[in-house]
Image (cartoon, rainbow, N blue to C red):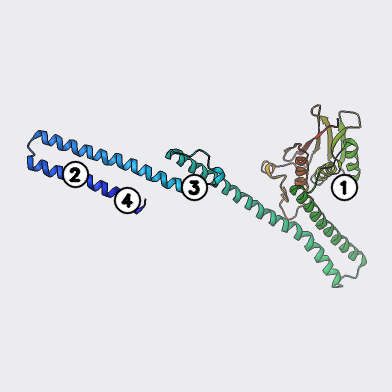
Amino acid sequence: MSSKFKSRFLLISISLLVSIVISLIFISISGTNNEFNFYKFSLIVILSLIIIYIFGVIYTRFFLYNKLKEISKDILPSKDISQTVTTNMDDLVDEIKDYDSQMKSEFSEMKKQESFRREFIGNLAHEIKTPLFTSQSYLLTLLDGALDDKSVNKKYLKTASKAIDRLNLIVKDLDLITKIESGQSNLNSVKFDVIELIQNVYEMLDFSAKKKNIELIIEHENNPPELVMADKEKIEQVITNLVDNSIKYGKENGTTEIVVQNLTDEKIIVRVTDNGIGLKDENYTRIFERFYRVDKSGSRTAGGSGLGLAIVKHIIDAHDEKIYVESEYGVGSEFSFTIEKSK
């Protein structure tokens, strides 16, 4: 409340109080024993207090309305100010409360995004540091000339080469997902047979599956070819990433099965199922985040860039399709996605 407002309100209040005092003196001179004068005085006091109260409420509301209006012009963005001028103070207060609530929500979202950003940077540093440190350690050992055994040297060089390959994979996948997110990676939709594409992926990953004695199975409702309309290269990336994950986290002597089914007249659904370790409930909401890993231990055996499922999600979203995940911890997982049929 400004000093100007205080002085005006105080001046009027004092004036009314002085009137009451004068009335009191007048009645005292006239004689307080007069019952009529007593009631008249009481009435004057009550009316004066009512007038002071009403005046205070009206003047305060008018003063606060103007102040709130000035504040609203300062803090509310021009795009949020309606074309109709608000003339009711309660409505104006509601507008400011709504804006305050909106700002708090946006600030909370910014804090959440900042937390994700820090976690992402930390995960990225860890993913890059691990293969870099591995390759550096083995190469420095070889450079020191401490090893004379050629077989050991070859083993060390092979390990360093694998670490560099993993580092290259991280950079490649990070570049891919950045291009997808920024819209630089355009879709090149063509007609192709998804069954044939799955068979090609199986052939490429057959060696990895055999090392764990995992059987690769494919089932489909319709006779080949199962023609779809999508970006063939990117859908191949999706299937490769899902099958590769299934093998990495699958159990020895297990299975990875892809089932292609009709969903509607315009869509098919591709299901990739395994009997691996499965997912816990807390992993569901973050499974498609970049560098998010179910196994956070330093001794984890599954390699990769940590971007596989994030790339899968972005590619499917870019096609305006849906991806789903169902899992039971200790039993297995199923990732499924839709594709448009070729007309």
For badge 3, the amino acid type reads Lys
Name the residue nearer the viewer: 72 or 274: 72
The answer to which of marks 4 and 3 sits earlier in the sequence is 4
Look at label 4 and name its amino acid.
Lys
Task: Provide the secondary structure element on which disc 1 rests.
Answer: helix
Residue 304 visible somewhere in the drawing: no
Left or right: 86 as drawn, with respect to 248: left
How far apart are the two marked residues, 3 and 1, measured between alpha carbons?
Answer: 65 Å
Contact check, label 1 and label 4, Cβ < 8 Å: no
Residue sitting at 27 percent across and 42 percent down? 52
Q: Secondary structure at mark 3?
A: helix
The secondary element bearing badge 4 is classed as helix
Q: Is residue 329 left or right of residue 35?
A: right
Task: Kindly report the distance in space between the C-alpha atoms of the residues bearing marks 1 and 4.
Answer: 83 Å
Residue identified by numbered label 3? 73
According to the image, label 1 marks what residue?
208
